Amino acid sequence: MPDKMKSKSLLIKIVLGNLVTIIVLAILTIIFLPIDNLNKDTQIADDLLKNPDTQFLALTSYQKAQQNWPILKYNLEFQQKLSKSKSINENLRKTQPALYGFLKDSATSSEVENLINSLKQNSSVTNVKYISKEDTYNLYKEQHKNETSLLQLMSPNILPASIEVYLSDWSKQNDIKTYLQTQSSIDEAISNPKIP
């Protein structure tokens, strides 16, 4: 009988030992396997933050990484990068237009002036700038100065005049965009694609 008990005891120890090993391996897999994905998520945001042309996208990438990896809220280096990207976006929102309203060719100067004045009455609107067809064309020429074939196809009459709308409260962006879309002088209204 004592040998049978020893056998059972030994069998239980072996099973428990294997069970503990399986649990430890499972925990280690859960902890270390996703590290590659975590590194990929944060590396994408880091790369975006390094490039001045894509810095505005870094905030969204950092926020997604933190949502996917809640432990990042305890990582000081990550939080500093997140804070830097928030600061960049806040500065962009102060200096960049929130919306562009492309004017119809048929829009009269008095319609445009009335539209600008009505927008300025909104407490969320800090400024409205009129951009003439000629100004748009000059900007286009500057951006595409090395592409002579494109420049030969363009003239100021092809590109639309527009207005740029600057906001202090970007949560009102969709409301202002909807307002612009209802105006008879506006052909199309779009949000600034550079700022999420």
Image: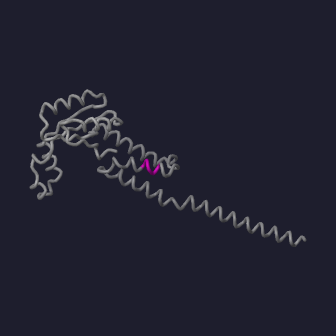
Residues 36 and 123: in front is 123
Q: Residue 100 appears at what percent x and percent y?
A: 24, 41
Residue drawn at 16 percent across, 46 percent down: 139
Q: Residue 69 appears at what percent x and percent y?
A: 50, 51
Residue drawn at 32 percent across, 44 percent down: 195
Occupied quadrant, residue 173: top left
Residue drawn at 86 percent across, 72 percent down: 4
Q: Is residue 92 left or right of residue 66?
A: left
Magenta region's main secondary structure?
helix
Residue drawn at 16 percent across, 53 percent down: 144
What count of labels does the image hold? 0
Look at the image and name its color scheme: one colour
Q: Residue 131 appears at what percent x and percent y?
A: 16, 39
Q: Split into 4 quadrants, where in the image is the N terminus? A: bottom right
Q: Is residue 109 left or right of residue 76?
A: left
Say whether residue 191 is magenta: no
Q: Split into 4 quadrants, where in the image is the C terminus? A: top left
Q: Residue 107 appears at what percent x and percent y?
A: 14, 37
- In the displayed structure, 14 sits above or below 114; it is below
Q: Which residues are magenta?
A: 62-66
Residues 79 and 168: in front is 168
- List the single residue furthest toward the right: 1
Occupied quadrant, residue 102: top left
